[in-house]
Image (tube, coloured by chain):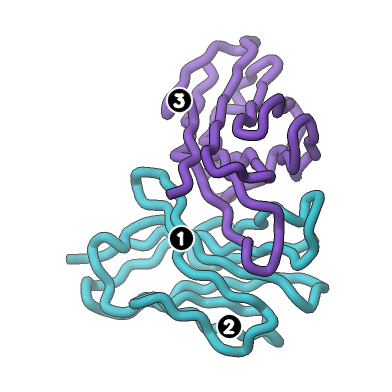
Amino acid sequence: AQTVTQSQPEMSVQEAETVTLSCTYDTSESDYYLFWYKQPPSRQMILVIRQEAYKQQNATENRFSVNFQKAAKSFSLKISDSQLGDAAMYFCAYRSQYSGGGADGLTFGKGTHLIIQP
Amino acid sequence: DVKVTQSSRYLVKRTGEKVFLECVQDMDHENMFWYRQDPGLGLRLIYFSYDVKMKEKGDIPEGYSVSREKKERFSLILESASTNQTSMYLCASSLSFTASNTEAFFGQGTRLTVV
């Protein structure tokens, strides 16, 4: 079974600064998918960014980018120019390459609470 | 836009009651999921369904059952609610897995309190 570990329960950053959220995972699969989801106080989970393990290039979405280190099984999220609206819980998640059964579900980390200081 | 709608945002039930949490999605997704979210534990999969009337247990199915009679609707049932089932419940849906269809879409959650 896969596991996802987020070692930072809480992080704080000044507005306009850059912050990096850590995520490591454990799997025996060679191909898989990794995600960062954001959950603001509204509780609506929103997909921030997605990375396919077979792609060497790190995914980027505007101010959000990842540092994917496959050998180290590490998948960190960098948020540049932090804004007040970035304040939320951030969850790292893993999805198997295989379809059907439980493989279609996501395995989540425990989350990191990101605080943006004005 | 994909929409996943959970019938209640807040629910208070008594111990021993039978509780139904309803989830509806409007994008013809094959897969639907129920997760439980607790502080410090993240999201844990309770049950999921990959087709009408099909279901499989997730990581923490004890004390729960599910029903999927129509493709768009997935219900989570607490047969006899207990205080340790006080939690946030999140429903999600997704297309059948392909390399280009990997995203899951979530509802806004139901915060259930069992007293």
Percent from the top left, x then y, of residue A46? 44, 55
| Chain identifier of the cyan chain | A
Q: Nearer the viewer, residue A7 or A89?
A: A89
Residue type pointed to by label 2: Phe
Residue type pointed to by label 3: Ser
Q: Is residue A29 above or below residue B39?
A: below
Q: What residue do we see at 71% from left, 40% from top? A: B48
Mark 2 residue element: strand
Badge 2: few (under 14), some or many (20 or more) residues near its Cα, within 10 Å? Answer: many
Discs 3, 2: same chain: no
In which chain is the residue bearing label 2?
A: A
Residue at mark 2 to residue at mark 1: CA–CA distance: 17 Å
Q: Is residue B82 left or right of residue B56?
A: left
Q: What residue do we see at 22% from left, 71% from top? A: A15
Kindly indicate whether the residue at mark 2 contacts the one at mark 3 (C-beta within 8 angstroms).
Answer: no
| Chain identifier of the purple chain | B
Kindly indicate whether the residue at mark 3 contacts the one at mark 1 (C-beta within 8 angstroms).
Answer: no
Percent from the top left, x then y, of residue B64? 72, 27
Percent from the top left, x then y, of residue B34? 63, 38
Residue linked to disc 2: A68
Front label number (1 vs 3): 3
